[in-house]
Amino acid sequence: MKPFKLPENFLLGSATAAEQIEGGDKNNNWYDWCIKGHIKDNSTCLRANEHWERFRDDIELMKALNHKTYRMGLSWSRIEPEEGKFDPKAIEHYREELELLRSSGIVSLITLHHFAHPLWLVEKGGFEDKSVLWYFERYVKHVVSSLGDLASDFITFNEPNVYALYGYFYGTWPPGRKSLRLYNRVLRNMTICHIKAYKLIHKIRRDNGFTGETKVGLAHHLRVFDPYNRYNPLDIMTARLMEYLFQDMVMKSMSSGFLRPPMGFGIPLTAGKYQDFLGINYYSRTAARFKGFQDSIMPGGPRNDLGWEIYPEGLYRLCKKYSRIYHIPIWITENGTCDANDSFRARFIYDHLYQASRLCDEGVRIERYYHWTLMDNFEWLEGESAPFGLYHVDFETQRRTLRKSGEFYAELSRSNEVKRCLSP
Ligand code: BGC
């Protein structure tokens, strides 16, 4: 394996989400889903990493990893626990966290919605109902007016395609609906929310004279879709169709304001450019099969503990392809793996960042990489049983222990390079 070097201004860090690490909040759709018995190990997000209390120590953990940037989520249900009633203590808390990150030399990137929201919004119909357009706008306005002096970089939605697919088409996530009509409607509403938020964030930061260039985007879950049998025209067609319905339709609509069918038609607000960076969450590839319209795994390839194929080349292919389409800087807003024994995570990081370095060498503008994730956390349906962390977490004691792969990432982040050849 070859040594490689990333550009000096390339920022490395990690990503987390509020409801996966903070703990202590029952007022959100995911806690409600947990107590209805949907989580494999029967854990709930009420414990998670107790990050709400331990955030100062956790920032020390980031410093030990030589983080230059950190992607953090905000909890809407903490900020606005009741409809229209904002909690000043929650804002104070996030101000302290953001200030500490800043004084530690860590650039923060804020996610406004990462699969979770308050229960009162669920009662109002959540993202199915048009009222969300107004509620989301009001939430964003409050957040950016009160935190926008401490952060200039925002992600409106994490993986709208995954959220809509699992929550409204497969029905395995809250609110457990199964309807193609709803999948499209939710994505439409999210698109309008995103565009309104994009404009609002820029406006509020500009009007208040907050320093730093404002950057707003989305964290898209992107996969490579290859035909399971590359000689089978039906598998080839299935791959293209899945790719369009799962990601291209969503990305094109959200970034331009011009809705693509079947998600929608026409321009609900105004057409424009609604992404300042292309956020890519990359984990794996789909081997598409016509038979049963199946989302399979390519046979023979390496896999992680959850059975996901490990395919670093996919990151290269996606960045190459989408940089030609969107012409904006790419931020890898998530990339990581589930590896309880920590036997392949360092290699995973090496292989993916090696692809990033190839892209940089070829002139593709990749500026940041956020490893998923800082520490083992509450992994949605898997609960506490799927460790993705650079730190191992004992959930009983909340003790965090740096993994070997974490040491490797810390060294890489210190110098932005891998000097020695690694043994496989
Ligand atoms: C999500 C994270 C999740 C990770 C690993 C991503 O799609 O944004 O919240 O923990 O995948 O499953």
Image (cartoon, rainbow, N blue to C red):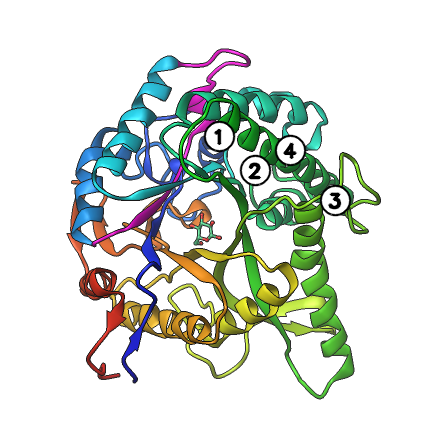
Q: Looking at the picture, how far across and down is residue 212, in whole percent?
A: 41, 37
- In this orientation, which residue lies closer to the viewer: 2 or 362? 362
Q: Looking at the picture, how far across and down is residue 421, in whole percent?
A: 22, 83
Left or right: residue 299 versus residue 304 is right
Q: Which residue is the site of mark 2?
A: 174
Q: Residues within 10 Å of mark 2 (few under 14, many from 20)?
A: many
Q: Which residue is the site of mark 1?
A: 32
As measured in the structure, the alpha-carbon distance from the residue carrying label 2 to the one carrying label 4 is: 19 Å
Residue 92, placed above or below residue 108: above
Name the amino acid type tagged 3: Asn
Q: Does label 2 or label 1 sit earlier along the sequence?
A: 1
Which corner quadrant of the image does residue 231 belong to? bottom right
Q: Which residue is the site of mark 4?
A: 193
Q: Does label 1 or label 4 sit earlier along the sequence?
A: 1
Which corner quadrant of the image does residue 389 belong to? bottom left
Q: Residues within 10 Å of mark 4 (few under 14, many from 20)?
A: many
